[in-house]
Image (cartoon, rainbow, N blue to C red):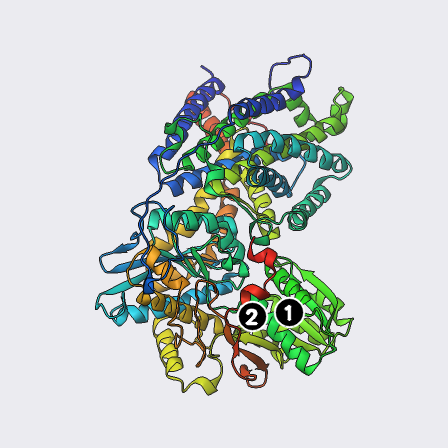
Amino acid sequence: MTSRRRLQMIGLAASIVALVVLSLIPHLTSATDTQRWAQALYIGMAAMGLNILTGYNGQVSIGHGAFFGLGAYTSALLMHQHGWQFLPTLLVSAPLCFVVGVLIGFPALRVKGLYLALVTLGLAVLFPDLTKHFVHVTGGTNLVALNRTELEPPQWVPTWLSAIGRDDQWAYYVTFALTVVLVIATYLMVRSRFGRALIAVRDHEAAAETVGINAARVKVLAFGLSALYAGLAGSCSVLVDHLANADKVQTFQLSIKFLVAVVIGGAATVIGPLIGAGVIVGLQWFISEVLPRHVGSVGILKRTLGNPAASPAIFGILLILFVFVMPDGIVGGLRRFWTRLMSGRSGAPPPTPAPLTT
Amino acid sequence: MNHRGRDRRGPSNSLRALALCTVLALVIAACGSSRRSGNTTGNTGASTPGGTTPIIDTSNCPAGQDSVGVSGNTITLGTSLPESGLYAPFTAILKGERSYFSYLNAQGGVEVPKGSGKKYQIKLVDKDDAYDAARTVTNVNSLINDTKVFSLFNVVGTKNNLGARDTVNSDCVPDLLIASGAVQWGNTKFPWMLGSELVPYPLEVRVFVDYLKKNKPNAKIAVLKANDDFGQSYADTLTELIKGTNLTIVQTQGYDPESSDVKSAVTSLAATNADAFLLGATLLACPNALTAMGDAGWKPIVYMSGTCVSKLLLGAAGKNADGLLTVTPLVDPADPGNASLPAMQLYMQQVKKYSDADATDGIVAYGWTTAALMARILENSPKLTRSSVMETARNFKDGTGIGLELPGATWDTSATDWFLGETFQLITYDATAGHTKKLGPLVNLDGKTAELSPQSLLHS
């Protein structure tokens, strides 16, 4: 058995364990924790989408919070104002986000790198203003708050999927199922011709074109697909958080969160962004909920570690440490660790390292 | 390893992933069409103080939840507020609240109902939401379901409470003394919410308009508003109230509530050289706007939102804040002239004892007073149940002498009046002295909020 083959077996086993554990989450934890897991999943979905664009295709976006918001508002408004069930709204929000993504993708053909990042930043800043002008729902604000009946699962859903802890189960399982679908879709996509074209365009656009790849088409499609993922994530967030909301700070922070999830988890890896999202949500929970409770009343500790105002700083420091220790993300780091382990054990010459991707 | 992959040649391979996504979404969606019916109901029967018809209808409340949050002799309250991020200065509210509850608990606690001799300790659980409505909703759900609080207390922010509006109303958990002067808390469809003693924003505008009518009846007014519902309620009410007067609005500028950067907006307003300036802004945007106004050499009559009344914020504006008008429902702790009041002495002494907060900061005074108001509502409730306390808050008649409430003021509610903070004081800031001064007698607009509010906001 080669090292790579063994790695694949371990990967498969880990995936099965992860699937089993994740499908049991609502039965193992409280409603609040279930919601937190669901949040990690939807952030992971959006990060997977951003990863298609940034990790595989090399186009940087810090505006994906806008696509996320577009998905969220589409679902929330259809449910709140038109009485739709949640699931059918995905049929509208996913194609809509794809189309808008493609439209944004066209001008993106002309701008690259940092400039593209700035253009997408504009997207994140503009989106909340658009909602402020067009959406006046809850209390005359651009907030769409859904009530419990609007969030209820359809009747055909068996109670074991939805009964415990009211509707949290349903929100969790829908998000979970969509995440699994998107993971499989990503896995198949990166191994397809389109996936290889994405990487080829990222690595050398001119060379890719000489072998017959339509770089423009690939880049625009990458934008659309990536927006579609973010939109689906936004739709799920409505079910999980019971509302759609957009303000500048939040839309921007969300965009950065997706990017951080990609970088921490491992860019251009299928599962990395999900792991990254899990780490972000876990860290934030730890810093804002666990730490303040356990530093006790020791003066200096309480004022620093236990002070919520310090939590963004602690989070930032941890992120920097993370990037120092694992510059290619958790998945990349684990891969390096594995190759080192295997080469040490077999005494064989070290295999070529996995491609470092940015 | 992603570069390796078998070299397959086939049509439309590139769109396979997309097709898979949409097909699966279709399949899932096709199944969902019907709606689940049936909900948990249980009539717990609200107590009716004074034998009147209850305002709070409990027929749709979940059964057996009316006394949740009271265990032994402890009442657990929950709050959510920005303790991190741009709005972190609001943490001072929490310090004031904690000081009051610590003081009260040290006295033996709150007696419910008054005269029964049964005293309870108050425990306040706080959660940080960084002013993000989604996080507030998560916090509120967690406070209700995990912490099992009796009532929510002084949750900060309009959107933040609107996000939790359905939850608190269908769970029948009181969302009391909301830290927002928005008029949406007067929406009769959602009776489980009540705003705090903050002056409702439309009343502030009314006072300003009255002042101008008297002192500068032909004034041209420039408006700075936060680009959200908060700023909009100032602008809308002003437009409404100047109808039929000689007052005119020359220009309205919006600013981003998330950035507090108002310099360009104010510079543009200054160019109009208007006679009056309405500042529908909050926190750091207030001193920023006043400074920009001073820099531009513009000297209008300024009205600043009551949410900015804080020694810290006014001090930051320095001499540019001199002479501005605003309102407050409280006695100013920064004014040494108030130091002899017994209520002020108690406040100063206890805040110093129980917190590291600056007691002369109006935001701390607000927290202290709101906590005292909460205790007063609990005391007046005939029973220690959620429905009874909510009923009491909605029909509140014992609203004098609470915390740092202005002497002579009354905070009350009734079946037709859902706002507490309708008596207040017009004040002006004296930059040399570093505190505010009263201007004229107490303003009493009791029961007027609903008619002065933009109806679209009130019922939305």
Q: Name the spot of residue A198 as percent of width and height, x first.
A: 67, 27
2 and 1 marks in contact (CB < 8 Å): yes
Within 10 Å of disc 2 (Cα), the crowding (few <14, some 14-19, many 20+) is many
Q: Name the spot of residue B40 as percent of width and height, x first.
A: 36, 40
Which chain is mark 2 on?
A: B
Name the residue rendered at 40%, 72% in the picture: B399
Q: Name the spot of residue B349 as percent of width and height, x first.
A: 36, 79
Occupied quadrant, residue B314: bottom right
Q: In the displayed structure, would residue A18 be above or below residue B118?
A: above
Query: Is residue B405 among the parts visible in the rendering?
Result: yes
Q: In the displayed structure, would residue B91 be above or below residue A331?
A: below
Mark drawn on residue B279 = 1
Name the residue rendered at 54%, 26% in the picture: B29
Please state if A234 lies on the left or on the right of B107 as rendered. Answer: right
Q: Secondary structure at mark 1?
A: strand
Occupied quadrant, residue B456: bottom right
Of residue A22 and residue A331, the one placed in the foreground of this image is: A22
Q: How many marks?
A: 2
Quadrant in the picture for the C terminus of chain A: top right
Which chain is mark 1 on?
A: B
Within 10 Å of disc 1 (Cα), the crowding (few <14, some 14-19, many 20+) is many
Q: CA distance from mark 2 to mark 1?
A: 10 Å
Q: Name the spot of residue B374 as percent of width and height, x first.
A: 37, 66
Q: Secondary structure at mark 2?
A: helix
Badge 2 or badge 1: first in the primary sequence: 1
Q: Say which amino acid is labelled 2.
A: Cys
Instruction: Return the residue at label 2.
Output: B308
Q: Say which amino acid is labelled 1.
A: Leu
Occupied quadrant, residue B202: bottom right
Query: Is residue A295 among the parts visible in the rendering?
Result: no
Of residue B286 and residue B162, the one placed in the foreground of this image is: B162
Q: In the displayed structure, would residue B313 be above or below residue B229?
A: below
